[in-house]
Image (tube, helix red, strand yellow):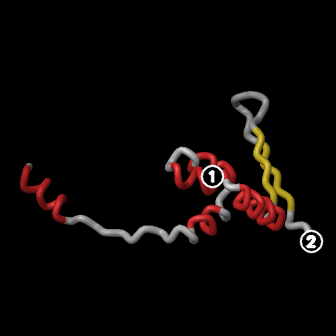
Amino acid sequence: MERKMTKLAEKKISVDPIPLDLIPEILIGLPVKTLTRLLCVSKQYASIIRNRDFIKSYLIMSCTRPQSLITPGQEPATLPLIASSPKSR
């Protein structure tokens, strides 16, 4: 058992961190629900997401994307309503 643990410990994978200037560019393409989850991931992500410039950029980008709305059904057995609007031009 110890031998397996040693082999796993030896196989460390080094990953370069994402450059700080790229993180907002990546986050801006994510849905709001994902962004709210990322608020809890790290202080750095929360700081970026709460930044006024990021919020303005996100709102501008969201105006150019198709909008979607998902609402739960009235009863537990009913399917949710999914509606989307085409890109407005």
Residue 53, percent across and down?
A: 72, 61
* Residue plotted at (60% across, 67% down): 26
**Residue type at mark 2?**
Arg
Q: Mark 1 Cα within 10 Å, few/some/many (few <14, many 20+)? A: some
Which residue is disc 1 drawn over? 35
Q: Nearer the viewer, residue 26 or 80?
A: 26
Q: Is residue 41 left or right of residue 53?
A: left
Q: Earlier in the sequence, mark 2 or mark 1?
A: 1
Quarter occupied by the C terminus: bottom right
Q: Is residue 64 left or right of residue 30?
A: right
Q: Is residue 56 left or right of residue 40?
A: right
Residue 84, percent across and down?
A: 82, 56
Q: Is residue 78 left or right of residue 12?
A: right
Mark 2, secondary structure of its residue: loop
Measure the C-alpha gap from mark 2 to mark 1: 26 Å
Q: How many marks on residues? A: 2
* Residue plotted at (21% across, 65% down): 11
Which residue is disc 2 drawn over? 89
Residue 56, percent across and down?
A: 77, 60
* Residue plotted at (61% across, 57% down): 48
- Quadrant in the rendering for residue 81: top right
**Residue type at mark 1?**
Leu
Q: Nearest to the eye among marks 2 and 1: give it.
A: 1
* Residue plotted at (81% across, 57% down): 67
